[in-house]
Amino acid sequence: MEADSNIQTNTTEEFKRKACAWAQQFDTICILDNNAIENALQLQEIEFALAVGVVDELIGSGQNDWKQLKVFVDKHAQQTPVFGYLSYDLKNQIENLSSKHADKIGFEPMYFFAPLHVVLIDTNGQLMVMSEQGNDIMEAIKKTDISPKTLASLSMKQKVSKEQYIETVKKIQEHIVKGDVYELNYCVEFYAENATIDPVETYLSLQAISPTPFACFIKHKDKYLLSASPERFMKKSLNKLYSQPIKGTVRRASNAEEDEALKQALLHSEKERAENLMIVDLVRNDLAKSSETGSIAVDELFGIYSFKQVHQMISTVSGTIIDGLNPVEALENAFPMGSMTGAPKVMAMQLIEQYENTKRGLYSGSVGYFAPNEDFDFNVVIRSIQYNAASKYVNFEVGSAITIDSVAEQEYEECLLKASAMLAALGVKLT
Protein backbone atom coordinates (compact mmCIF):
# COMPACT_ATOMS: atom_id res chain seq x y z
CA MET A 1 0.00 0.00 0.00
CA GLU A 2 1.36 3.39 -0.95
CA ALA A 3 0.52 7.08 -0.98
CA ASP A 4 -1.39 7.44 2.31
CA SER A 5 -2.53 11.03 2.73
CA ASN A 6 -5.40 13.25 3.79
CA ILE A 7 -7.64 14.92 1.24
CA GLN A 8 -9.21 18.27 2.03
CA THR A 9 -13.02 18.16 1.91
CA ASN A 10 -13.26 20.83 -0.78
CA THR A 11 -11.00 18.86 -3.12
CA THR A 12 -12.49 15.41 -2.53
CA GLU A 13 -15.15 15.75 -5.23
CA GLU A 14 -12.58 16.91 -7.79
CA PHE A 15 -10.32 13.99 -6.88
CA LYS A 16 -13.17 11.50 -7.23
CA ARG A 17 -14.12 12.91 -10.64
CA LYS A 18 -10.52 12.65 -11.82
CA ALA A 19 -10.18 9.13 -10.43
CA CYS A 20 -13.33 8.06 -12.25
CA ALA A 21 -12.05 9.48 -15.54
CA TRP A 22 -8.56 8.00 -15.03
CA ALA A 23 -10.06 4.55 -14.42
CA GLN A 24 -11.67 4.34 -17.85
CA GLN A 25 -8.46 2.95 -19.39
CA PHE A 26 -9.33 -0.37 -17.68
CA ASP A 27 -11.86 -2.92 -18.95
CA THR A 28 -13.06 -3.68 -15.43
CA ILE A 29 -13.99 -0.98 -12.92
CA CYS A 30 -15.99 -0.87 -9.71
CA ILE A 31 -16.59 2.46 -7.98
CA LEU A 32 -18.49 2.74 -4.70
CA ASP A 33 -19.32 6.25 -3.49
CA ASN A 34 -20.99 7.34 -0.25
CA ASN A 35 -21.26 10.95 -1.50
CA ALA A 36 -20.51 12.22 2.03
CA ILE A 37 -24.06 11.29 3.05
CA GLU A 38 -24.69 9.88 6.49
CA ASN A 39 -26.05 6.34 6.21
CA ALA A 40 -28.99 5.27 8.33
CA LEU A 41 -27.62 4.71 11.86
CA GLN A 42 -24.18 5.86 10.59
CA LEU A 43 -23.16 2.38 9.49
CA GLN A 44 -20.53 3.59 7.04
CA GLU A 45 -16.80 2.88 7.01
CA ILE A 46 -15.69 3.83 3.49
CA GLU A 47 -16.46 7.12 1.77
CA PHE A 48 -15.16 6.12 -1.65
CA ALA A 49 -13.62 3.04 -3.23
CA LEU A 50 -12.28 2.58 -6.74
CA ALA A 51 -11.12 -0.86 -7.88
CA VAL A 52 -9.62 -1.37 -11.33
CA GLY A 53 -7.81 -4.05 -13.29
CA VAL A 54 -8.12 -7.79 -12.80
CA VAL A 55 -5.72 -10.06 -10.94
CA ASP A 56 -8.30 -12.81 -10.60
CA GLU A 57 -11.99 -13.02 -11.52
CA LEU A 58 -15.13 -15.10 -11.16
CA ILE A 59 -17.58 -14.97 -14.05
CA GLY A 60 -20.98 -16.44 -13.26
CA SER A 61 -22.14 -19.20 -15.56
CA GLY A 62 -25.72 -19.56 -14.38
CA GLN A 63 -24.94 -22.79 -12.51
CA ASN A 64 -23.44 -23.25 -9.03
CA ASP A 65 -22.55 -19.54 -8.92
CA TRP A 66 -23.14 -19.16 -5.17
CA LYS A 67 -20.87 -22.11 -4.45
CA GLN A 68 -18.19 -20.70 -6.74
CA LEU A 69 -18.43 -17.32 -4.99
CA LYS A 70 -17.79 -18.93 -1.60
CA VAL A 71 -14.64 -20.55 -2.99
CA PHE A 72 -13.53 -17.30 -4.65
CA VAL A 73 -14.00 -15.14 -1.53
CA ASP A 74 -12.26 -17.72 0.68
CA LYS A 75 -9.39 -17.87 -1.81
CA HIS A 76 -8.70 -14.16 -1.36
CA ALA A 77 -9.42 -13.92 2.36
CA GLN A 78 -6.68 -12.20 4.37
CA GLN A 79 -5.11 -11.02 1.10
CA THR A 80 -7.14 -8.55 -0.93
CA PRO A 81 -10.64 -7.09 -1.13
CA VAL A 82 -12.98 -8.53 -3.75
CA PHE A 83 -15.47 -6.36 -5.66
CA GLY A 84 -18.39 -7.27 -7.87
CA TYR A 85 -22.10 -7.71 -8.42
CA LEU A 86 -25.00 -10.13 -8.01
CA SER A 87 -27.72 -10.04 -10.66
CA TYR A 88 -31.39 -10.43 -9.76
CA ASP A 89 -31.63 -13.73 -11.63
CA LEU A 90 -29.34 -15.50 -9.19
CA LYS A 91 -32.71 -16.15 -7.52
CA ASN A 92 -33.12 -18.95 -10.07
CA GLN A 93 -30.27 -20.81 -8.37
CA ILE A 94 -31.90 -20.47 -4.96
CA GLU A 95 -35.54 -21.25 -5.73
CA ASN A 96 -37.31 -23.16 -8.51
CA LEU A 97 -37.72 -20.04 -10.66
CA SER A 98 -36.90 -18.98 -14.19
CA SER A 99 -36.71 -15.82 -16.30
CA LYS A 100 -37.78 -15.89 -19.93
CA HIS A 101 -37.99 -12.18 -20.77
CA ALA A 102 -35.58 -10.52 -23.19
CA ASP A 103 -32.34 -9.16 -21.74
CA LYS A 104 -30.96 -6.38 -23.93
CA ILE A 105 -28.08 -5.46 -21.56
CA GLY A 106 -26.47 -8.85 -20.94
CA PHE A 107 -24.66 -8.64 -17.60
CA GLU A 108 -23.41 -12.03 -16.45
CA PRO A 109 -25.40 -13.59 -13.57
CA MET A 110 -22.51 -12.78 -11.22
CA TYR A 111 -19.13 -11.14 -11.55
CA PHE A 112 -16.39 -10.61 -8.93
CA PHE A 113 -12.76 -9.68 -9.25
CA ALA A 114 -9.63 -9.24 -7.18
CA PRO A 115 -8.40 -5.84 -8.43
CA LEU A 116 -4.97 -4.76 -9.59
CA HIS A 117 -5.29 -1.32 -7.97
CA VAL A 118 -7.60 0.00 -5.22
CA VAL A 119 -8.04 3.64 -4.21
CA LEU A 120 -9.87 4.19 -0.91
CA ILE A 121 -11.04 7.22 1.03
CA ASP A 122 -12.32 6.48 4.51
CA THR A 123 -14.90 8.52 6.42
CA ASN A 124 -12.12 10.62 7.99
CA GLY A 125 -10.87 11.70 4.57
CA GLN A 126 -7.83 9.42 4.73
CA LEU A 127 -6.66 8.36 1.27
CA MET A 128 -5.12 4.94 0.69
CA VAL A 129 -3.83 3.46 -2.56
CA MET A 130 -3.44 -0.31 -2.51
CA SER A 131 -1.00 -0.88 -5.33
CA GLU A 132 2.67 -1.39 -6.04
CA GLN A 133 2.41 1.72 -8.24
CA GLY A 134 0.61 3.89 -5.68
CA ASN A 135 2.60 7.08 -6.19
CA ASP A 136 2.44 6.80 -9.98
CA ILE A 137 -1.33 6.30 -9.80
CA MET A 138 -1.76 9.36 -7.61
CA GLU A 139 0.21 11.49 -10.03
CA ALA A 140 -1.73 10.15 -13.01
CA ILE A 141 -5.07 10.86 -11.33
CA LYS A 142 -4.02 14.42 -10.47
CA LYS A 143 -3.09 15.07 -14.11
CA THR A 144 -6.33 13.64 -15.52
CA ASP A 145 -8.42 16.07 -17.54
CA ILE A 146 -12.00 16.45 -16.34
CA SER A 147 -13.16 19.19 -18.66
CA PRO A 148 -16.95 18.95 -18.85
CA LYS A 149 -18.38 17.41 -21.99
CA THR A 150 -21.67 18.20 -23.63
CA LEU A 151 -24.06 15.28 -23.44
CA ALA A 152 -26.21 14.60 -26.46
CA SER A 153 -29.93 14.50 -25.77
CA LEU A 154 -31.53 11.09 -25.86
CA SER A 155 -35.02 9.91 -26.72
CA MET A 156 -36.39 7.08 -24.58
CA LYS A 157 -39.55 5.06 -24.63
CA GLN A 158 -41.66 3.58 -21.88
CA LYS A 159 -42.13 -0.16 -22.20
CA VAL A 160 -45.42 0.09 -20.32
CA SER A 161 -47.95 2.88 -20.89
CA LYS A 162 -49.79 4.52 -18.01
CA GLU A 163 -52.97 2.69 -19.01
CA GLN A 164 -51.18 -0.67 -19.11
CA TYR A 165 -49.55 0.07 -15.76
CA ILE A 166 -52.88 0.82 -14.09
CA GLU A 167 -54.44 -2.33 -15.56
CA THR A 168 -51.55 -4.47 -14.28
CA VAL A 169 -51.74 -2.97 -10.78
CA LYS A 170 -55.41 -3.92 -10.63
CA LYS A 171 -54.55 -7.50 -11.66
CA ILE A 172 -51.88 -7.65 -8.94
CA GLN A 173 -54.43 -6.44 -6.40
CA GLU A 174 -56.71 -9.29 -7.44
CA HIS A 175 -53.92 -11.66 -6.39
CA ILE A 176 -53.70 -9.83 -3.07
CA VAL A 177 -57.46 -10.26 -2.53
CA LYS A 178 -57.08 -13.99 -3.26
CA GLY A 179 -54.28 -14.21 -0.68
CA ASP A 180 -51.52 -15.11 -3.15
CA VAL A 181 -49.35 -12.21 -1.93
CA TYR A 182 -49.85 -9.22 0.33
CA GLU A 183 -47.26 -6.97 -1.28
CA LEU A 184 -45.52 -7.03 -4.67
CA ASN A 185 -42.85 -4.78 -6.11
CA TYR A 186 -43.90 -4.11 -9.70
CA CYS A 187 -41.31 -2.51 -12.00
CA VAL A 188 -41.38 -1.03 -15.50
CA GLU A 189 -38.67 -0.25 -18.05
CA PHE A 190 -37.62 2.94 -19.83
CA TYR A 191 -35.29 2.25 -22.76
CA ALA A 192 -33.53 3.59 -25.86
CA GLU A 193 -32.18 1.67 -28.83
CA ASN A 194 -29.29 2.72 -31.07
CA ALA A 195 -28.20 5.01 -28.25
CA THR A 196 -24.73 6.32 -27.56
CA ILE A 197 -23.99 7.82 -24.16
CA ASP A 198 -20.84 8.88 -22.32
CA PRO A 199 -20.94 6.59 -19.26
CA VAL A 200 -18.59 8.72 -17.15
CA GLU A 201 -20.31 12.03 -17.84
CA THR A 202 -23.73 10.46 -17.35
CA TYR A 203 -22.65 8.89 -14.06
CA LEU A 204 -21.18 12.16 -12.78
CA SER A 205 -24.30 14.00 -13.86
CA LEU A 206 -26.47 11.47 -12.02
CA GLN A 207 -24.38 11.92 -8.85
CA ALA A 208 -24.74 15.70 -9.06
CA ILE A 209 -28.51 15.47 -9.57
CA SER A 210 -29.14 12.74 -7.02
CA PRO A 211 -26.26 12.11 -4.57
CA THR A 212 -26.93 8.99 -2.52
CA PRO A 213 -25.00 6.87 0.00
CA PHE A 214 -24.77 3.67 -2.07
CA ALA A 215 -23.89 5.05 -5.49
CA CYS A 216 -21.78 2.89 -7.75
CA PHE A 217 -20.25 2.67 -11.22
CA ILE A 218 -19.60 -0.70 -12.84
CA LYS A 219 -17.75 -1.22 -16.10
CA HIS A 220 -17.15 -4.73 -17.35
CA LYS A 221 -15.89 -4.59 -20.91
CA ASP A 222 -18.75 -3.04 -22.90
CA LYS A 223 -21.40 -3.11 -20.17
CA TYR A 224 -22.00 -0.34 -17.64
CA LEU A 225 -24.06 0.29 -14.53
CA LEU A 226 -24.46 3.90 -13.36
CA SER A 227 -26.21 3.93 -10.02
CA ALA A 228 -27.57 6.46 -7.53
CA SER A 229 -28.84 3.88 -5.06
CA PRO A 230 -29.98 5.08 -1.63
CA GLU A 231 -30.45 1.56 -0.25
CA ARG A 232 -28.25 -0.97 1.54
CA PHE A 233 -29.03 -4.65 1.02
CA MET A 234 -26.77 -6.15 3.65
CA LYS A 235 -23.63 -5.37 5.61
CA LYS A 236 -21.47 -7.66 7.71
CA SER A 237 -19.30 -6.00 10.33
CA LEU A 238 -17.36 -8.53 12.40
CA ASN A 239 -20.11 -10.80 13.81
CA LYS A 240 -23.06 -8.49 13.05
CA LEU A 241 -25.33 -8.50 10.02
CA TYR A 242 -27.38 -5.44 9.06
CA SER A 243 -30.07 -4.96 6.44
CA GLN A 244 -31.76 -1.61 5.76
CA PRO A 245 -34.84 -1.95 3.54
CA ILE A 246 -36.49 1.12 2.03
CA LYS A 247 -40.24 1.28 1.63
CA GLY A 248 -41.87 4.69 1.52
CA THR A 249 -41.01 7.57 -0.81
CA VAL A 250 -42.14 11.17 -1.11
CA ARG A 251 -40.79 14.07 -3.15
CA ARG A 252 -38.80 16.99 -1.76
CA ALA A 253 -40.13 20.55 -1.92
CA SER A 254 -38.12 23.75 -2.41
CA ASN A 255 -40.15 25.49 0.29
CA ALA A 256 -38.86 24.47 3.74
CA GLU A 257 -42.29 24.43 5.35
CA GLU A 258 -43.83 22.32 2.60
CA ASP A 259 -40.79 20.01 2.60
CA GLU A 260 -41.17 19.38 6.33
CA ALA A 261 -44.90 18.76 5.87
CA LEU A 262 -44.17 16.16 3.19
CA LYS A 263 -41.62 14.52 5.48
CA GLN A 264 -44.10 14.33 8.36
CA ALA A 265 -46.81 13.02 6.07
CA LEU A 266 -44.48 10.17 5.03
CA LEU A 267 -43.61 9.42 8.65
CA HIS A 268 -47.26 9.17 9.69
CA SER A 269 -48.68 7.54 6.55
CA GLU A 270 -50.47 4.34 7.58
CA LYS A 271 -50.06 2.96 4.06
CA GLU A 272 -46.29 3.58 3.93
CA ARG A 273 -45.81 2.22 7.45
CA ALA A 274 -47.73 -0.92 6.54
CA GLU A 275 -45.60 -1.46 3.42
CA ASN A 276 -42.40 -0.88 5.37
CA LEU A 277 -43.44 -3.20 8.20
CA MET A 278 -44.29 -6.02 5.79
CA ILE A 279 -40.77 -5.91 4.36
CA VAL A 280 -39.19 -5.56 7.81
CA ASP A 281 -40.93 -8.79 8.82
CA LEU A 282 -39.63 -10.46 5.66
CA VAL A 283 -36.07 -9.20 6.31
CA ARG A 284 -36.22 -10.42 9.92
CA ASN A 285 -37.06 -13.87 8.57
CA ASP A 286 -34.27 -13.69 5.95
CA LEU A 287 -31.64 -12.62 8.49
CA ALA A 288 -32.81 -15.26 10.97
CA LYS A 289 -31.58 -17.96 8.55
CA SER A 290 -28.01 -16.72 9.11
CA SER A 291 -28.21 -15.43 12.70
CA GLU A 292 -27.90 -16.83 16.18
CA THR A 293 -31.26 -17.69 17.75
CA GLY A 294 -32.72 -14.72 19.60
CA SER A 295 -30.28 -12.18 18.11
CA ILE A 296 -32.59 -10.56 15.53
CA ALA A 297 -33.40 -6.95 16.41
CA VAL A 298 -35.13 -4.03 14.71
CA ASP A 299 -32.65 -1.26 15.48
CA GLU A 300 -34.77 1.44 13.85
CA LEU A 301 -38.33 1.27 12.54
CA PHE A 302 -39.71 3.87 10.11
CA GLY A 303 -36.62 6.11 10.10
CA ILE A 304 -37.06 9.07 7.74
CA TYR A 305 -33.96 10.07 5.76
CA SER A 306 -33.78 12.95 3.33
CA PHE A 307 -31.91 12.91 0.03
CA LYS A 308 -31.62 15.63 -2.58
CA GLN A 309 -34.69 14.51 -4.51
CA VAL A 310 -36.77 12.45 -2.09
CA HIS A 311 -37.50 11.60 1.53
CA GLN A 312 -37.31 7.85 2.22
CA MET A 313 -38.58 5.60 5.00
CA ILE A 314 -35.75 3.26 6.05
CA SER A 315 -35.76 0.59 8.72
CA THR A 316 -32.74 -1.27 10.09
CA VAL A 317 -32.73 -4.96 11.06
CA SER A 318 -29.70 -6.71 12.58
CA GLY A 319 -28.59 -10.11 13.79
CA THR A 320 -25.50 -11.91 15.10
CA ILE A 321 -24.13 -14.16 12.37
CA ILE A 322 -23.95 -17.87 13.20
CA ASP A 323 -20.41 -18.74 14.21
CA GLY A 324 -18.57 -20.34 11.29
CA LEU A 325 -21.18 -19.47 8.67
CA ASN A 326 -19.63 -18.54 5.34
CA PRO A 327 -20.39 -14.83 4.72
CA VAL A 328 -21.53 -15.57 1.17
CA GLU A 329 -24.21 -17.83 2.62
CA ALA A 330 -25.62 -14.90 4.61
CA LEU A 331 -26.13 -13.01 1.35
CA GLU A 332 -27.56 -16.07 -0.39
CA ASN A 333 -30.02 -16.70 2.43
CA ALA A 334 -31.55 -13.25 1.98
CA PHE A 335 -31.28 -12.85 -1.80
CA PRO A 336 -32.89 -11.17 -3.58
CA MET A 337 -33.80 -8.39 -1.17
CA GLY A 338 -37.41 -8.34 -0.03
CA SER A 339 -37.84 -4.65 -0.79
CA MET A 340 -37.55 -5.50 -4.51
CA THR A 341 -39.78 -8.59 -4.50
CA GLY A 342 -42.65 -8.39 -2.06
CA ALA A 343 -44.03 -11.04 0.24
CA PRO A 344 -44.28 -13.95 0.41
CA LYS A 345 -41.09 -13.75 -1.57
CA VAL A 346 -41.25 -16.79 -3.85
CA MET A 347 -44.83 -16.20 -4.96
CA ALA A 348 -44.04 -12.51 -5.43
CA MET A 349 -41.14 -13.41 -7.73
CA GLN A 350 -43.37 -15.75 -9.72
CA LEU A 351 -45.91 -12.97 -10.22
CA ILE A 352 -43.16 -10.49 -11.10
CA GLU A 353 -42.17 -12.81 -13.93
CA GLN A 354 -45.79 -13.04 -14.99
CA TYR A 355 -46.59 -9.32 -15.03
CA GLU A 356 -43.31 -7.61 -15.90
CA ASN A 357 -42.03 -7.77 -19.47
CA THR A 358 -38.31 -7.04 -19.06
CA LYS A 359 -35.63 -9.24 -17.55
CA ARG A 360 -34.35 -7.27 -14.58
CA GLY A 361 -30.73 -8.33 -14.96
CA LEU A 362 -28.53 -6.30 -12.66
CA TYR A 363 -31.50 -4.10 -11.65
CA SER A 364 -32.78 -5.40 -8.27
CA GLY A 365 -29.42 -7.09 -7.85
CA SER A 366 -26.55 -5.85 -5.72
CA VAL A 367 -23.07 -4.31 -5.99
CA GLY A 368 -20.47 -4.32 -3.24
CA TYR A 369 -17.28 -5.78 -1.82
CA PHE A 370 -15.83 -8.35 0.53
CA ALA A 371 -13.02 -7.05 2.73
CA PRO A 372 -9.98 -9.30 3.37
CA ASN A 373 -11.49 -10.29 6.74
CA GLU A 374 -14.67 -11.31 4.83
CA ASP A 375 -16.76 -8.45 6.16
CA PHE A 376 -18.92 -7.13 3.33
CA ASP A 377 -21.23 -4.32 2.27
CA PHE A 378 -23.73 -4.56 -0.61
CA ASN A 379 -26.29 -2.12 -1.98
CA VAL A 380 -29.61 -2.56 -3.74
CA VAL A 381 -29.37 -1.75 -7.45
CA ILE A 382 -32.15 0.81 -7.89
CA ARG A 383 -32.20 4.34 -9.40
CA SER A 384 -29.69 2.93 -11.88
CA ILE A 385 -28.94 3.20 -15.59
CA GLN A 386 -27.72 0.13 -17.50
CA TYR A 387 -25.87 0.51 -20.80
CA ASN A 388 -24.52 -1.94 -23.37
CA ALA A 389 -22.08 0.05 -25.51
CA ALA A 390 -21.78 -2.74 -28.10
CA SER A 391 -25.49 -3.06 -28.81
CA LYS A 392 -26.13 0.64 -28.01
CA TYR A 393 -29.01 -0.21 -25.71
CA VAL A 394 -29.65 1.84 -22.57
CA ASN A 395 -32.35 1.33 -19.98
CA PHE A 396 -33.45 1.83 -16.44
CA GLU A 397 -36.30 0.43 -14.40
CA VAL A 398 -38.41 1.90 -11.64
CA GLY A 399 -41.08 0.39 -9.45
CA SER A 400 -43.10 0.58 -6.29
CA ALA A 401 -44.73 -1.70 -3.77
CA ILE A 402 -48.28 -2.66 -4.63
CA THR A 403 -50.60 -3.47 -1.72
CA ILE A 404 -54.36 -3.71 -1.36
CA ASP A 405 -54.41 -0.01 -0.40
CA SER A 406 -52.40 1.15 -3.41
CA VAL A 407 -53.95 3.66 -5.80
CA ALA A 408 -52.64 2.77 -9.25
CA GLU A 409 -52.39 6.38 -10.46
CA GLN A 410 -50.40 7.37 -7.36
CA GLU A 411 -48.05 4.40 -7.75
CA TYR A 412 -47.46 5.44 -11.35
CA GLU A 413 -46.59 8.96 -10.22
CA GLU A 414 -44.14 7.50 -7.69
CA CYS A 415 -42.44 5.61 -10.51
CA LEU A 416 -42.09 8.83 -12.51
CA LEU A 417 -40.63 10.57 -9.44
CA LYS A 418 -38.03 7.83 -9.09
CA ALA A 419 -37.30 8.04 -12.83
CA SER A 420 -36.73 11.79 -12.82
CA ALA A 421 -33.04 11.76 -11.84
CA MET A 422 -32.11 9.19 -14.49
CA LEU A 423 -34.09 11.04 -17.15
CA ALA A 424 -32.34 14.28 -16.23
CA ALA A 425 -28.88 12.69 -16.18
CA LEU A 426 -29.49 11.24 -19.65
CA GLY A 427 -30.93 14.51 -20.98
CA VAL A 428 -33.95 12.55 -22.08
CA LYS A 429 -37.02 13.42 -24.06
CA LEU A 430 -39.73 10.82 -23.62
CA THR A 431 -41.45 9.56 -26.76
Image: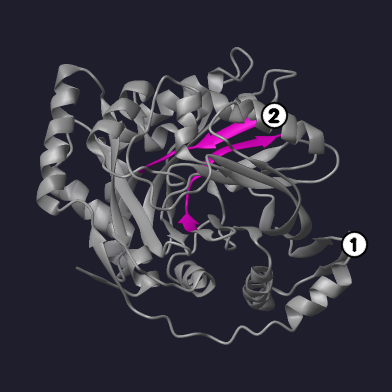
Would residue 70 be found to the left or right of residue 259 on screen? right
- Identify the amino acid type marked 2: Lys
**Tag of residue 132:** 1
The residue sitting at 29% across, 70% down in the picture is 255
Q: In the image, is residue 249 above or below residue 76?
A: below
* Residue interval drawn in magenta: 226-247
Would residue 77 be found to the left or right of residue 417 on screen? right
> In the image, is residue 234 part of the stretch drawn in magenta?
yes
Question: Along the line of sight, which residue is nearer the eye, 245 or 215?
Answer: 215
- Identify the amino acid type marked 1: Glu
Identify the residue position indicated by label 2 in the image: 70
> In the image, is residue 69 part of the stretch drawn in magenta?
no
What secondary structure prevails in the magenta region? strand
Q: In the image, is residue 130 above or below residue 367?
A: below
**Tag of residue 163:** none
Question: Along the line of sight, which residue is nearer the eye, 197 or 300?
Answer: 197
